[in-house]
Image (cartoon, rainbow, N blue to C red):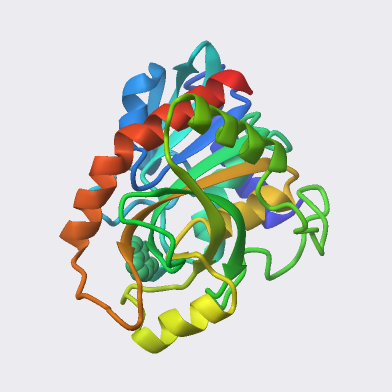
Amino acid sequence: MSELRNKINEAVNFIRTKTSMKPTIGIILGTGLGGLVKEIEIETIIDYEDIPHFPISTVESHHGKLIFGRIGGKEVVAMQGRFHYYEGYSMQQITFPVRVMSYKVGLGVETLFISNAGGGLNPEFEKGDLMIMTDHINLLGDNPLIGPNDNELGPRFPDMSEPYSKELIALAEKIAEEENIKIQKGVYAALTGPNLETRAEYRFLRIIGADAVGMSTVPENIVANHMGMKCFGMTIITDLCDPDNLQPLTVEEVIEVASKSEPKMTLLMKKLIERI
Ligand code: HPA
């Protein structure tokens, strides 16, 4: 058995001593989804630091808890606190929880929901818009699948023709229409950060086909695809990255815009989870 699988097994075995739930839905509570926790009928909370091999969050605003419960009667497991490459974690560390959650060798998750904040590159976008991720461009310069491949987890060369489930995208659009929530769709480019991008970089990102830019989600999505999980991702457009009219940006502004859009994102995700 691979070293990675031994680690997954140890983490899963520990979690099994705390809960017998077998959620088919996993949620990574990134920026803008913190409020979804209030919608979970919580059954068990496990601190990341207690789970063997789990990375520990360094960002203070994140809590580092694995939450088990129900949304609309559906069993879910939610990661409160996620990991970024710029914090110094390896890609394998960032994506370890996704492997632990998976149905293949882990807790039972077949569908993974992810949220994030990003800068808007598409000139049609407005601050505070929600963007459904239809695709991504990995500009992180690294990949969580580099290294020996465990064929039991997934193929050496995973297909990426549908990294974000078309079925879930269509359902989310339908729900957004019903709920009168303005929605954008687009391609998310992931860069390492932690600095924001230069004007020249924003120009480049637009030319190569990105609609939004951020620093997360892509590693988790790659691993979810590797393991045959469906994925749905959504970005809150917290600022506009117009190279010809670029304004300085602070993290406080990002958080302020994200928190204003949070109720829309929470509602949409909740309805989506209820209807799959
Ligand atoms: N780049 C630009 N703007 C942003 C980002 C980013 O990574 N994240 C949130 N707003």
Above-or-below relation of 243 to 228: below
Going by the image, does 89 lie left or right of 185?
A: left
Q: Is residue 259 visible?
A: yes
Above-or-below relation of 235 to 268: below
Q: Nearer the viewer, residue 35 or 123?
A: 123
Residue depicted at x 65% and y 57%:
222
Q: Is residue 87 visible?
A: no
Above-or-below relation of 44 to 218: above
Going by the image, does 209 lie left or right of 212?
A: right
- Looking at this rendering, what residue extends furthest in the bottom direction? 200
Residue depicted at x 45% and y 83%:
203
Residue depicted at x 60% and y 20%:
275
Residue depicted at x 35% and y 27%:
37
Residue 47, percent from left and from top:
35, 35
Residue 8, percent from left and from top:
61, 44
State how many labels appear. 0
Residue 216, percent from left and from top:
46, 60
Going by the image, does 267 lie left or right of 219?
A: left
Going by the image, does 15 lie left or right of 44?
A: right
Q: Which corner quadrant of the image does residue 38 belong to?
A: top left
- Looking at this rendering, what residue extends furthest in the top direction? 73
- Which quadrant, please, contains the C terminus? top right
**Where ligand 1 lies, by quadrant?**
bottom left
Q: Nearer the viewer, residue 7 or 160?
A: 160
Residue 11, percent from left and from top:
55, 39
